[in-house]
Amino acid sequence: MKSTHRFFCILLLCAVGSLQAVSQVNTTLSPTARWASIAAEQYWIHPDITYGVANNYTLKLDVWQRNDAKTPAPTLIYYHGGGWVFGDRTGATLLLMPYLEMGWNVINVEYRMASVSLAPAAVEDCRCALRWAIKNAKEYNIDTDRIVLTGHSAGGHLSLITGMLPEGTDLDNNCHGNEKLKVAAIVNWYGISDVADLIQGPNLRDYAAMWMGSQADRLAIAKRVSPLTYVRAGVPPIISIHGDADAVVPYEDSVRLHHGLTVAGVPNELVTIKGGGHGGFKEAELEDAYEKIRAFLRARGLQ
């Protein structure tokens, strides 16, 4: 009887031990889950900041500021997509996550759509947002030597043109200042490089035509806001991600940009998603793209 009692005690102890082990396994968070659990405590969120007014339209942005950084932090500026004709910054929130997980500050920018102002208004606004970030760097703990621009589709175009424009063009007239508008790198997700190519001919796209409207000098404006116009030595390093079956933004845009930058001696990379369309990439393709982005940024001391 004593041996039987001892046997059941041993079984009970084993069962308790097993339950404790299972409990420990179930309550141990993965690195991703742990970050998701504590991220809210790591950031101050400053929403709906006015960075300018144009055509009686109030321009807004949101700042996600790392609250425990002891020194100025690398900062991402994000421009949303939508063909310059639709979309808003709130729809892009989840696209900011990779950079928040890296511990960066993030600035999410709104700009004027075609329904408010035709081209080149969106470019003017995005340049103003960059100037605002540099001008307010101390208040929001922004490292002005480590500002990276990014966006998807039209946002990719805006990140390219904002970072590639030389100083002193009339596209900066809406927000004057003495700040040097420099960025450390650009991450371009299938952005338009040649706007002029999309408003006429075989690559005509409705969204591009709508952004230009019926302006008499629409072709000249399109060339002024085309990143390919400004390819030259000294522009920021650029990594582009583009599907070679994209029916919305021609893949050839990124190929031509890559070639031009390479000839000019600009550090750059083109990540081609085989069979990929206009976004909607597979999980493995996105993971690979972000691994390449991180490596590209790391090689330039930005991560």
Image (cartoon, rainbow, N blue to C red):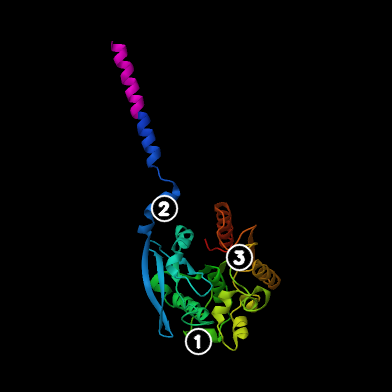
The residue that label 1 is drawn on is 173
Residue 194 located within the stretch drawn in magenta: no
x, y (%) of residue 54? 44, 84
Q: Residues within 10 Å of mark 2 (few under 14, many from 20)?
A: some
Residue depicted at x 46% and y 59%: 97
In this picture, residue 207 sits left or right of residue 136: right
**Secondary structure type for disc 1:** loop
Distance from disc 3 to disc 2, alpha carbons, whole Å, reads: 28 Å
Splitting the image into 4 quarters, where does residue 133 fall? bottom left
x, y (%) of residue 40? 36, 58
Q: Nearer the viewer, mark 3 or mark 2?
A: 3
Camera-side residue of 113 and 105: 113
The residue that label 2 is drawn on is 35
Q: Is residue 95 above or below residue 182?
A: above
Most frequent secondary structure within the magenta stretch: helix
Residue depicted at x 64% and y 64%: 269
